[in-house]
């Protein structure tokens, strides 16, 4: 019997050749609190059903990690699609799009609302529960690209059909679940038996399938509706309809057919109209003196603030920008993270007492000397910058805690206008493969960090989970408190960002932990035709990341 040597946790163990990774995982499951759902073979993610045919290093992915959560979600999504196919065989109107993440739910819409009712939703969930009990195996096979395109055409999956018309590779990996075949971007679980925690629930014009979050993978919490966020999702769909670009394949069509410039102009015009509407809403409320802007990393907050200020000026207002960073406490008073580093993201890092004192005085028409935080010395400095609000003056305050009333506790609610901004991905890969919002922001951040801070992609990827943890704690819980949400995502941006991001991602060391994420993003860019940046408006939010902005960003 042939054997292979596998490095596991620094030790070498011998297994028979072609042993499945899942069999090996069973030997190590007791080392983990949560289920092993995938493996890492020589720094590349693979399914547990993969046969190990040669010497290698093996690690494991559990459901309490971002990667493991993604595997879990894909597994549940494929069960849902199999159930729909079983309930409505060959019915094109029963196809669904998986459109967005809302809290712990994944929002879906049927092609026709005639299928949307409690009986159908309950029936689908019952079928899915049956798949879990049967513990059906997910299998993966390579299919000729032309054959896959024909499969998608027959199944009325027009987004997938258009997407793979631009596929360079001759083969596509197709997953099979009990006879239902589909394409998914990313690894699948070994079988349905481990996907016990999920729920279907009607919501809005569709429904959500609810799964645990990665921090509590064995606990299913109630779905929390987010009406304002949902409205942004619907607005994004409306914009997609206006531009007739409903997937990456359609974007590639627009680029290939020479329609990119028109697409850019329409998208930027939609952004400008939205910003103008927000400014008009602010101007119509004369009691509002503080515009509070918050959003996660790489949302384009700085460019948005500039563009909003211009719109406010056209309406007779005089905006003044106050960076919340200037109210940081002195460095020796800054709270520390568990690793001993400074935690600039928590509210305690801000001198809220001084901030409220200054803002209250300004609201009363008094003159205030504003501080400036010196990041080199870690001290607030008094540079003599004075501010006094006139009747048409308004303050634009950008900062991570802008939506949290604990920051501005002394200011009357009627004096504050809160704006939540994020790059809420409009474009999906196809009907069933979302582009996570965090991916778009990470790519923006990689490009900007390299251009403006000399930070390479490996370092940006390494700190990204910490950034996301801060967002989950200090930003996302307050997003529904905003008066308005602005979606800064641009439907064309990933085609443009591709030319900037790919060289940076190729530089990530193959032996580093960050290589897994870099490789995933490189494979992701394979879906896109690249596009030049020469037609991108110089006031575009995208310019904040690729350079060339007319604003100081």
Image (spheres, rainbow, N blue to C red):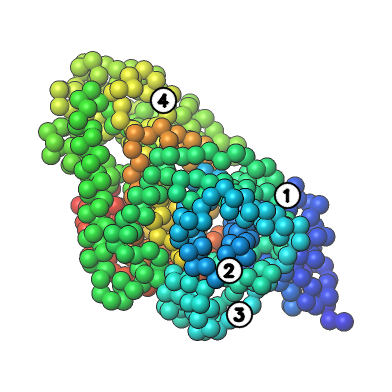
As drawn, is 253 to the left or to the right of 95? Answer: left
- How many marks the image carries: the answer is 4
The residue that mark 1 highlights is 34
Choose between 453 and 120: the one closer to the eye. 120
Which residue is drawn at the image coordinates 55% and 71% (left, top)? 90
Among numbered discs 3 and 2, the one appearing first in the sequence: 2
Q: Quadrant of residue 425?
A: bottom left
- Number of other residues with Cα within 10 Å of mark 1, as a class: few under 14, some 14 to 19, many 20 or more: some
**Numbered tag placed on residue 89 in the rendering:** 2
Q: Quadrant of the N terminus?
A: bottom right
Do the numbered discs 3 and 2 sit on residues whose CB atoms are within 8 Å? no
Compute the Cα span from label 1 to label 3: 31 Å
Which residue is drawn at the image coordinates 78% and 77% (left, top)? 18
The residue that mark 3 highlights is 142
Compute the Cα span from label 3 to label 2: 24 Å
> Circle 2 — which element?
loop
As drawn, is 171 to the left or to the right of 195? Answer: left
Among numbered discs 2 and 1, the one appearing first in the sequence: 1
Compute the Cα span from label 4 to label 3: 54 Å
The residue that mark 4 highlights is 405
Residue 158 position in % (x across, y down): 44, 71
Among numbered discs 4 and 1, the one appearing first in the sequence: 1
Choose between 234 and 461: the one closer to the eye. 234
Q: Quadrant of residue 281?
A: top left
As drawn, is 100 to the left or to the right of 194? Answer: left
Among numbered discs 1 and 3, the one appearing first in the sequence: 1
């Amino acid at each position: 019997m042939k054997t292979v040597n596998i490095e596991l946790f620094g030790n070498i163990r011998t297994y028979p050749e072609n042993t499945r990774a899942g069999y090996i995982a069973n030997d190590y499951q007791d080392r983990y609190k949560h289920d092993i759902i995938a493996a890492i073979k020589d720094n590349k993610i693979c399914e547990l059903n993969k046969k190990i045919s040669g010497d290698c290093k093996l690690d494991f992915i559990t459901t309490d990690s971002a990667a493991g959560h993604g595997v879990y979600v894909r597994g549940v999504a494929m069960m849902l699609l199999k159930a729909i196919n079983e309930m409505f065989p060959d019915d094109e109107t029963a196809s669904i799009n998986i459109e967005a993440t809302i809290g712990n739910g994944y929002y879906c819409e049927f092609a026709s609302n005639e299928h949307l009712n409690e009986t159908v939703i309950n029936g689908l969930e019952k079928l899915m529960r049956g798949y879990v009990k049967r513990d059906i195996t997910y299998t993966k096979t390579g299919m000729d690209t032309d054959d896959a395109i024909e499969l998608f055409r027959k199944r009325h999956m027009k987004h997938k059909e258009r997407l793979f018309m631009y596929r360079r590779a001759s083969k596509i990996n197709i997953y099979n679940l009990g006879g239902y075949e589909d394409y998914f971007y990313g690894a699948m679980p070994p079988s349905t038996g481990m996907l016990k925690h999920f729920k279907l629930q009607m919501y809005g014009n569709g429904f959500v399938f609810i799964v645990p979050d990665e921090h509590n993978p064995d606990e299913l919490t109630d779905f929390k509706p987010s009406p304002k966020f949902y409205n942004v999702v619907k607005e994004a769909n409306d914009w997609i309809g206006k531009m007739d670009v409903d997937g990456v394949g359609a974007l590639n069509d627009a680029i290939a057919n020479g329609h990119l410039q028109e697409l850019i102009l329409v998208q930027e015009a939609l952004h400008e109209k939205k910003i103008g509407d927000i400014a008009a809403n602010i101007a119509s409320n004369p009691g509002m003196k503080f515009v509070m802007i918050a959003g996660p990393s790489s949302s384009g907050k700085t460019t948005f603030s500039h563009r909003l200020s211009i719109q406010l000026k056209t309406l007779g207002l005089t905006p003044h920008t106050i960076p919340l960073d200037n109210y940081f406490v002195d460095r020796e008073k800054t709270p520390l993270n568990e690793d001993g580093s400074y935690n600039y993201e928590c509210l305690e890092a801000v001198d809220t007492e001084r901030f409220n004192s200054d803002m209250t005085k300004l609201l009363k028409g008094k003159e205030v000397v504003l501080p400036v935080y010196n990041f080199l010395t870690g001290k607030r400095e008094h540079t003599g910058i004075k501010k006094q609000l006139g009747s048409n003056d308004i303050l634009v305050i950008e900062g991570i805690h802008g939506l949290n009333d604990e920051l501005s506790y002394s200011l009357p609610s009627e004096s504050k206008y809160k704006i939540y901004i994020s790059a809420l991905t409009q474009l999906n890969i196809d009907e069933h493969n979302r582009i996570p919002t965090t991916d778009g922001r990470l790519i923006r951040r990689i490009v900007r960090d390299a251009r403006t801070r000399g930070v390479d992609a490996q370092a940006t990827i390494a700190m990204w989970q910490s950034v996301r943890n801060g967002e989950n704690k200090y930003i996302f819980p307050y997003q529904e408190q905003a008066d308005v949400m602005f979606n800064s995502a641009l439907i064309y941006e990933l085609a443009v960002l591709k030319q900037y991001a790919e060289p940076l991602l190729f530089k990530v060391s193959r032996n580093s932990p960050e290589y897994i994420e870099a490789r995933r993003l490189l494979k992701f860019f394979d879906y896109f035709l690249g596009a030049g940046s020469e037609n991108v408006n110089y006031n575009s939010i995208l310019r904040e990341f690729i350079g060339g902005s007319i604003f100081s960003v």
